[in-house]
């Protein structure tokens, strides 16, 4: 989702992406970026659906997907757009990652206990 958002922003945003020129090259690049947005979204849905089927809990797959999108968005915003992350954002990200880790480790431990019983 984060990559799709980036490609969409590059395709539609006139500040960071392709400028609205009247030449055919600008339109072709914009169309290519928008098509790539659809391809990336389709791939993301396929991978997410697969992770739901392989996961023992739908909640773990959803939380892990959300966390991965958050980290990817943060990295891309800093690297590509030169944004600065505030300490509040960083603290929130650490808390979310801690929660994701607890969910995943708790799910793993719960499955081991059930198998032994």
Image: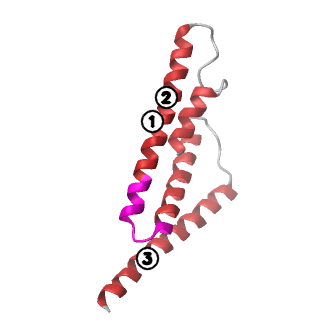
Q: Residue at x 59, y 41 (%)?
A: 77
Q: CA distance from mark 3 to mark 2?
A: 38 Å
The x, y position of residue 17, in whole percent, is 60, 25
Q: Earlier in the sequence, mark 1 or mark 3?
A: 1
Q: Which residues make up the magenta segment?
A: 48-60
Foreground residue, 38 or 25?
38
Q: Secondary structure at mark 3?
A: helix
Which residue is labeled 2 in the image?
35
Residue at image point 51% right, 41% down:
3
Q: Nearer the viewer, residue 74 or 8?
A: 8
The residue carrying mark 3 is 107
Contact check, label 2 and label 1, Cβ < 8 Å: yes
The residue to which callout 1 is attached is 39
Q: Quadrant of the C terminus?
A: bottom left
Apparent side of residue 85 relative to residue 65 in the rendered image (left or right): right
Q: Residue furthest top?
A: 23
SS of the residue at dot 2?
helix
Quadrant hosting residue 5: top right
Residue 16 versus residue 1: which sits nearer the camera? Answer: 1
Q: Tell me residue 57's x, y (percent).
A: 44, 70
Q: From what the image shows, is residue 91 above or below residue 108?
A: above
Give percent across and percent down for residue 83. 64, 40
**Residue 49 belongs to magenta span:** yes
Question: Distance from label 2 to label 1 (Cα)?
Answer: 6 Å
Q: Nearer the viewer, mark 1 or mark 3?
A: 1
How many tags in the picture?
3
């Amino acid at each position: 989702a984060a990559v799709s958002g980036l490609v969409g922003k590059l395709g539609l945003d006139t500040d960071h992406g392709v400028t609205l020129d009247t030449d055919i090259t600008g339109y072709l690049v914009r169309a290519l970026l928008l098509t790539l947005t659809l391809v990336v979204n389709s791939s993301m849905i396929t991978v997410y659906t697969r992770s739901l089927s392989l996961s023992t809990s739908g909640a773990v797959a959803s939380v892990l997907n959300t966390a991965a999108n958050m980290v990817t968005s943060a990295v891309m915003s800093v690297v590509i757009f030169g944004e600065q992350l505030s300490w509040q954002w960083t603290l929130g990200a650490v808390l979310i990652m801690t929660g994701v880790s607890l969910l995943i480790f708790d799910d793993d431990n719960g499955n081991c206990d059930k198998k032994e019983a």
